[in-house]
Image (cartoon, coloured by chain):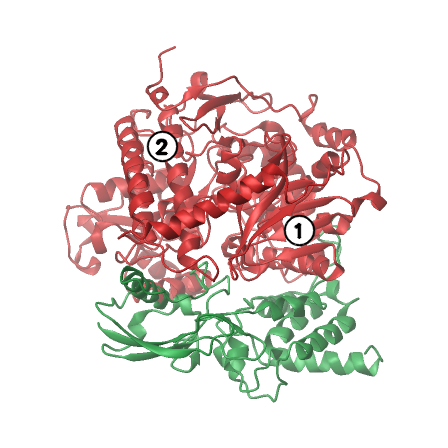
Amino acid sequence: MNITVRVWRQKNADDKGRMVTYGVENVSEHMSFLEMLDVLNEQLTLSGDDPIAFDHDCREGICGMCGVVINGIAHGPEVTTTCQLHMRSFEDGAVIDVEPWRAGAFPVVKDLVVDRSAFDRIIQAGGYISAPTGSAPDAHAVPVPKDDADHAFDAATCIGCGACVAACPNGSAMLFTSAKITHLGLLPQGQPERESRVIGMVEQHDHEGFGGCTNIGECTSACPKGIPLDTIAQLNRDLLGALAHGKA
Amino acid sequence: MTTNVSEQFHAVGEDIHDTKAPAGPIERRWDERKFSTNLVNPANRRKLSVIVVGTGLAGASAAATLGEAGYHVKSFCYQDSPRRAHSIAAQGGINAAKNYRNDGDSIYRLFYDTVKGGDFRARESNVYRLAQVSVNIIDQCVAQGVPFAREYGGLLDNRSFGGVQVSRTFYARGQTGQQLLIGAYQALERQIAAGTVEMNTRHEMLELIMIDGKARGIIVRDMVSGEIETHTADAVVLATGGYGNVFFLSTNAMGCNVTATWRAHRKGAYFANPCYTQIHPTCIPVSGDYQSKLTLMSESLRNDGRIWVPKKAGDDRAPSDIPEDERDYYLERIYPAFGNLVPRDIASRAAKYQCDAGKGVGPGGLGVYLDFADAIARLGRHEVEAKYGNLFDMYAQITGENPYEQPMRIYPAVHYTMGGLWVDYDLQSNLEGLFVAGEANFSEHGANRLGASALMQGLADGYFVLPYTIANYLADGPYEKIDDSHPEVVAARTAVEERIEKFLSINGTRTVDSFHKELGQIMWDYCGMERTEEGLIKAISMIRDLKADFWSNVKVTGVNEELNQTLERAGRVADFFELGELMCIDALNRRESCGGHFRAESQTEDGEALRHDDEFAYVSAWEFGDEQPTLRKEPLEYEYVEMKSRSYK
């Protein structure tokens, strides 16, 4: 198949940026979306142009490094990561718009690459259990009900890609934040820091310039790992409880 | 002794030995070593600094633990966040000798299985320690909130993995690596917040700084601004993963590379056993020449899937049109006792032989069928879906084919590299102050790694070994402060800058990827699943020619002072050429078959790998030389496990 892509090109953080149109011929339906960009980049390089910069690493949908907005949808038309999207999802002759995540807290670094370090800082603000190496009791000392463990796992599958922020009209990172609150808050090991965690992480979330959550739900429908929206309800309950205890 | 044909490519030096492991009963050695190490007063620790390169399981756990202890840690990764490191992609699980199933497991049995599984090419002392600390790892991870699979009673679930007879594998669905890495990442972020760890993301190490025989720092490139930075410290840890991407196509992440360890090798660190490569039998085959990476599917699929090819070469009928009596279930036929569950290397090689004989299926004839029709008939679709649903979905997503209705196609792919920088019992390389952890070192897996042991080793090194052994080294510090104007620092920086300038000035006609793909094909054809003397000699010559062409004809666009992904790849591929050549020389020297190294000349009448313990029971540690490398042998002795050859017939 032959396709046309219109790609956001921006030399660096200070550049204004613009959409640039490229044709890509002989695209196989079995190519991944990123392999299609690889092929385009080989063409650009040989003609002396600057190849398109995009983040990617594992290319098996787990590291969370890739992610672009395709035709206005974070990670494109299938609910998966960009690296796991294949060209069979597009028609021959398709015109495809490719843009970086758009959010004030994710400044563009170059082309399709954005700076998601705000996510790391939200984790630094409490997204952990303080368990210094060597201090742990036997793993069976504290049984965890299977249901809690399974739900904690569901929340823990977040890959930190940022699609939730890109999809949210408010640019909120509440799904990312609540996934960690839920993961750690459901486990007995996470209880001692449960209240300080939610206060710290939400404060950092706001400080980074992410928007507030108004329960739109675009985040969860764009999430390649299906993090459920009720994690945000869990965050709100924890936050209210912590504020009621005067932890702020 | 006959002269080895490999010696036209290398010199042979004096033997080397590990001098750090205490003698005496093996179960006491780690305790004794810990007791004999020097301690550092807590008040002095913040004056001591450690650089940790890489944030996978080994690097993140080491940086977090050293930070907790109070040292000043500088951590580096090439990704945008430490959470992206490729440990995250490990699916199956992590072994630990907890014996929670009461099924006869023990530290000794895990030790025994690992030494035997490594085909008697690992050090007994190191492996025993690994088995000992495995139990602490599970405790540590649970305390951090890693959501391992649990049973209804609330206790941890275990499964049997990779053909062992005990259930010692802990797991978190098919995402164990992800959950363990997130645990280590959170511990690391906690230390970053506490100010003990200074994190440098999107930074790539390009040179090691050696001063007065000690590793004292690194030169890195800020991958956003292009700035070349100098970082000095009292010790340097490399936890930079494996080098499977020398094959271009592998299950590694796209960015995985050998540059950090190779640059250290060029500065004098021995590179050990580079030819030991693990090739995983159940990966999704290549679909076209645009292919950028290969995806592994858990080998648990072989528990219920049956592997076959058409009996007739070149049979291009759809699998459903090939009647039962025209199919060759070759693993069941050749290995009736183990059938489809033979070890990874045997399954991989058997698939290659079928494809070489023209019986392969799918694009390019590089695939064999993995058929679940019988399992679905026997267990019902529902049960197959419950067991393998996520893998079937992944397969369908990538290939566009429905594995419930037609057989999967699989082909082997490079997955893990057992070789790496040589280290002693303290995980210190032959260079003082340079420590190496995780897949980047050569140590615990010998010639072959068992399933669910990579995660165990990464975390053992980072959480429980390095923090003791580095403290012992630092107890002699702080070492003299190094100024950026020190001649060795200036020389290292200049070398990096000149290399970058060289890449940008060649302006040739071929892309970096086209060279990388061609190198990968040479490695796969001649230094892959089966190696021969003739093929390896040919490969060395081809690699040298290709390398010369690369340095005169590669095209790297853009400038240094920007995010330049082509420039990043050029540096990595340049180092892969040199590593690839050393892998071939190592494979040529080792005229035996063992673990992940199969020499066609060394097999039994039945086609099984044949070791030559009399001649090759040693670690091959290679010393860099401008003209040619020098082989140094570390003899391996087995006091506890009797050397045997394996049989799966």
Q: Determine whether the residue tagged by mark 2 lies in a helix, strand or loop.
A: helix
- Quarter of the view holding residue B189: bottom right
Residue A179 visible, this angle: yes
- Pointer 2 indicates a residue of which chain? B
| Chain with red colouring | B
Mark 2, residue position: B584
Q: Is residue A196 above or below residue B588?
A: below
- Pointer 1 indicates a residue of which chain? B
Tell me, what hue is chain A? green
| Amino acid beneath label 2 | Cys
Q: Local crowd at mark 1 within 10 Å, few (<14), some, or many (≥20)?
A: many
Q: Is residue B544 above or below residue B219?
A: above
Give me the disc on residue B252.
none
The location of residue B120, given as percent across then percent down, is 50, 27
Mark found first going from the N terminus, 2 or 1: 1
Q: Residue at x 72, y 28 (%)?
A: B28
Residue B648 visible, this angle: no
The location of residue B136, given as percent across then percent down, is 69, 45
Residue nearest the observer in this picture, B125 or B34: B34
Mark 1, residue position: B74
* Quadrant where the C terminus of chain B is found in the figure: top left
- Quarter of the view holding residue B550: top left
Q: Determine whether the residue tagged by mark 1 lies in a helix, strand or loop.
A: strand
Residue nearest the observer in this picture, B437 or A84: B437
